[in-house]
Image: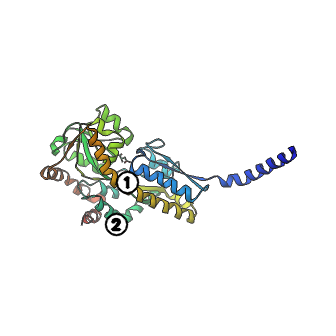
Amino acid sequence: SLFTLGKASLLATVLGFSFGAAAEPVEIKFSHVVAENTPKGQMALKFKELVESRLPGEYKVSVFPNSQLFGDNNELAALLLNDVQLVAPSLSKFERYTKKLQVFDLPFLFEDMDAVDRFQQSEAGQQLLNSMSRKGLVGLGYLHNGMKQFSANNALSLPGDAAGKKFRIMPSDVIAAQFEAVGAIPVKKPFSEVFTLLQTRAIDGQENTWSNIYSKKFYEVQTHITESNHGVLDYMLVTSETFWRSLPKDKRDIIKQSMDEAVALGNKLALEKANEDRQLILDSKRVELVTLTPEQRQAWVNAMRPVWSQFEDKIGKDLIEAAESANQ
Ligand code: LMR
């Protein structure tokens, strides 16, 4: 029996050796900066589930949330180095690769998420997915989060209330100009640092979606949230040309299909969370809601709208008009 056992283990070794290497699944690392209980966090997990159930043993998706693996400062560079294969930065974080996506940062451009969605699905919006191909980045689709709100340690009812205050912003010159337009001081900082910056009062406020404000507890370290809906925070799913082309076509199609389905779930959650997380924040009573009168809101529009013409040449007038026409 020792002999049989020996033979069996030898056989296993040989088989293991010859098939084991080939059977090693290809790992797709998906890195992001938000919490798991967010539209992006849930989208990523759904993507993992779908890919691994449709390509069992062949592909494996490892999701790294909360800037665990890479953060705002290095995730796109890491993607181009193939240290990560999939990221979904907000549309405000691509400035070094294209100026066109800055269209999404223009204040008070989109009336609501339906308009954002119409623009993204339009021909102009779909073309933007290819706007970074010369840099080696492939846009695979958009993912929603939602409309941005202002938070601060004072009530921001009129633009003058923001004057002289420091606001953390994403790395976007359009967003910087938006805050400068009301006399505020924009400070570009990675998402992973926002809570501490607010908690230590190194900065006075920030802008974000209800789901980010809730999941990262920003509302616990701010006194007021102004329901401004002044801009959109959405994402582009990007991979590198190198990685994408390395995939056999049939596998790539399954992976893309899985991504589209995961995005559909994420988008549904984005709409739900904009309401639910807002309500959870209000129920906590940790922060006061500032509701703008139509006149107050118009004052913000008037102050910030000049940013459009400031960036018209860089973004392109046609693109701005295409986005605006999505409001219908
Ligand atoms: C932010 O930096 O505030 C957001 O872009 C984070 C995110 O990915 O939603």
Q: Is residue 295 left or right of residue 27?
A: left
Determine which of the numbered discs, if any, sits on residue 86 in the image.
none
**Residue 230 location in percent, x, y?**
24, 52
Q: Is residue 231 left or right of residue 245?
A: left
Q: Which one is earlier in the sequence, the residue at label 1 or at label 2?
A: 2
**Residue 276 location in percent, x, y?**
31, 49
Would you identify the image quadrant in which residue 249 lies? bottom right
Residue at disc 1, secondary structure: helix
Decide which of 270, 313 is in the foreground and name it.
270
Q: Residue, x 34% and y 37% (percent of image)?
A: 195
Decide which of 299, 47 is in the foreground and name it.
47
Q: Which residue is mark 1?
A: 269
Would you identify the image quadrant in which residue 200 lies? top left
Q: What amino acid is at disc 2?
A: Ala
Q: Quadrant of the C terminus?
A: bottom left
Q: Residue, x 33% and y 55% (percent of image)?
A: 271
Q: Is residue 49 above or below residue 248?
A: above
Determine which of the numbered discs, if any, sits on residue 124 in the image.
2
